[in-house]
Amino acid sequence: MSATKRIFIFLAVAVILTSSLAACQQNTQPAGSDPATNNSITIVIPEDPPSFNPVITDTGYDSLVMELTMLGLTDIDQNGNVFTEIAAELPTTENGGVVQDETTGAMTVTWKMREDVQWSDGVPVTADDVIFTYNAILDPNQGSWIPGIDYIDSIEKIDDHTFIIKYSSVYPGYLTQFGGEQVVIWPAHYCDASQGFSAWDCARQPLSNGPFKLEEWVNGDHMTFVKNENYFETGKPAIDSVIVQIVPDQAVRKTMLINGDADLDMWSTEQMIDELKDVPNVEVSMSPDNRWVMRIFFNLAAKGTTNPIATPHPILSNVKVRQAIRMAIDVDTIAKEFFYGYAKPAWTEFFRPPYVCENVARPSFDLEGAKALLEEAGWTDQDGDGVRECHDCRTAEEGYPMEMEFITYSDYGEPLELTQQFVAEKLGGIGIKLNITVVEGSVLWAASTDGGIEQSGNFDMDIWDDGYAGIDPTDYLQSYYSTDAATPDNGYNYGRWSNEEFDSLLEEAYTLDETARLETFCKMATVLDEQVPEALLFTASNADAHSSRLQGVQSSTNDIVTWNAANWTLK
């Protein structure tokens, strides 16, 4: 299985987007921006979407506007069910759409497309558009990476509305590979292939095949979308226009909701949810399941290095230390005090349907047990200064103090910073001194060539939230836990953890046998629980606040809130 690869295209794309959007600026006011007097709604977000292509920029705001205008072959609902968009049906082994060669392991998937889907200019959406999109993504110089693209050998057109994807081996995420929250089909007759997938103009001035089409974009102020009269679903959308207004201040966005000047604020924080719960004209849509798991990343290599074998971390390379840190964190108090009771304990990657593993018990909060583990690992406080030192710890020099940097990112806000301070205080109480640092997420997660803290290995431990999109965790697991992903800029295994058993199990997970997959995932859960490459703590809420006049909004961990905008109605 080839290594997961992702192209970090930040600075170059940002320059292109900024110059393109600046050229489009106009001194106008959003048309129809009063939601109380017409069949229009206003969505408020803190910043402009960088484009309509979240594969490249992935801010969430790009996905929000993409879902208003563009379609994939499929999408996923709030309960994890895959449904068709451009596709006429879901290919399966039962209907003959999926065939696996038992000798070579290769897999072919035949897709049949709807024949009534058109671009907003009246041109039909065809297999040529799918192949055009695939080739643009695949371009080695101007393309990008999407999950599973390494497994595709070719895509072949059968007729205008039928094509076959040939895979080198089984790829279980095939149903949403060209759909979901990031990937859509782009128009071959409209996008300029010579500009490249990562920078083409049609990602900022899209041709719609979704429920709405972009009418106006005033950078830094608003975007106006109007109903796509060529949308294939009869009678939809019921809303005539959508104004996406740029409002950086969260307090202002909240006030606009309360006053009826806005209809939707995506990604509502726990504090905002709590403040809005009793407002009569505002509702909060909560996802049935949460995706974002707050977790501590441990660097198993010495700070500033990326090879835990050559330069093991003097403290965190010992698994008993990692287990002790996890045992000393009071998750319930954090959830109650800093996340308003909305955070839910999570200790395994496998807590969301359809892959729920119950074979791993929740780790206990046990300060005395944590102290005992540290003692066993050779970390004791013999000089009485409150900080443990290495005494026959075998991973550091004799007398090395148990002191580390503990980082988080500023973008999340006060609840996470209070959590960071709380964890540092409590670990300090058992002899682990943590010096806290807060940085911007863009600095924490950047490529090593751009000075990224994690990719460069320039950290001891940090805390932030992530979790897999959609319903298939295999690509996520590979990019965060596989040995291949431990290479800088080749994935997100920031701790440089490597485990042969886990790598073997990951290979086994690439199968179409769902029973076998669940068994494999639960074996993975055991390995991760024992080794603690990351300490999973609790889930952050996935919620979106909206006016009570706007009906049909459904928050989902599987997509951005506009995933079902075609179905929204107004009271």
Image (spheres, rainbow, N blue to C red):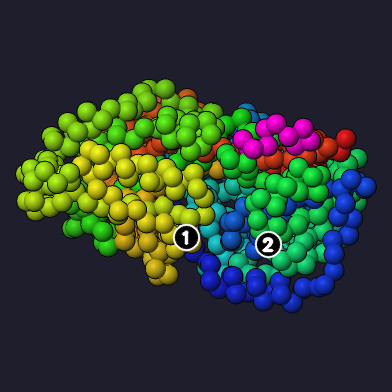
- Rendered residue at 57%/39% (across/down): 270
Q: Which residue is mark 2?
A: 48
- Rendered residue at 70%/57% (across/down): 247
What is the CA distance from the residue labelled 2 to the residue labelled 1?
A: 18 Å
Q: Which residue is mark 1?
A: 440
Viewer can see residue 248? yes
Crowd band around label 2 with a 10 angstrom C-alpha radius: few (<14), some (14–19), many (20+) = many
Vertically, is 74 above or below 60?
above
Q: Secondary structure at mark 1?
A: loop
Residue found farthest to the front: 385
| Depth order, front residue of 499/311 | 311
Image position of 401 (left or right of 278): left
- Rendered residue at 22%/28% (across/down): 369
| Depth order, front residue of 124/263 | 263
Residue 25, x across and y down, in percent = 77, 73
Q: Secondary structure at mark 2?
A: loop
Residue 503, x across and y down, in percent = 33, 42
Crowd band around label 1 with a 10 angstrom C-alpha radius: few (<14), some (14–19), many (20+) = few
| Depth order, front residue of 111/247 | 247
Image position of 228 (left or right of 112): right
Residue found farthest to the right: 37
Magenta region: 273-282
| Quadrant that contains the C terminus | top right
Vertically, is 20 above or below 416?
below
Vertically, is 387 above or below 90?
below
Q: Say which mark, if any, is on residue 71.
A: none
Residue 120, x across and y down, in percent = 85, 57
- Count the marks: 2
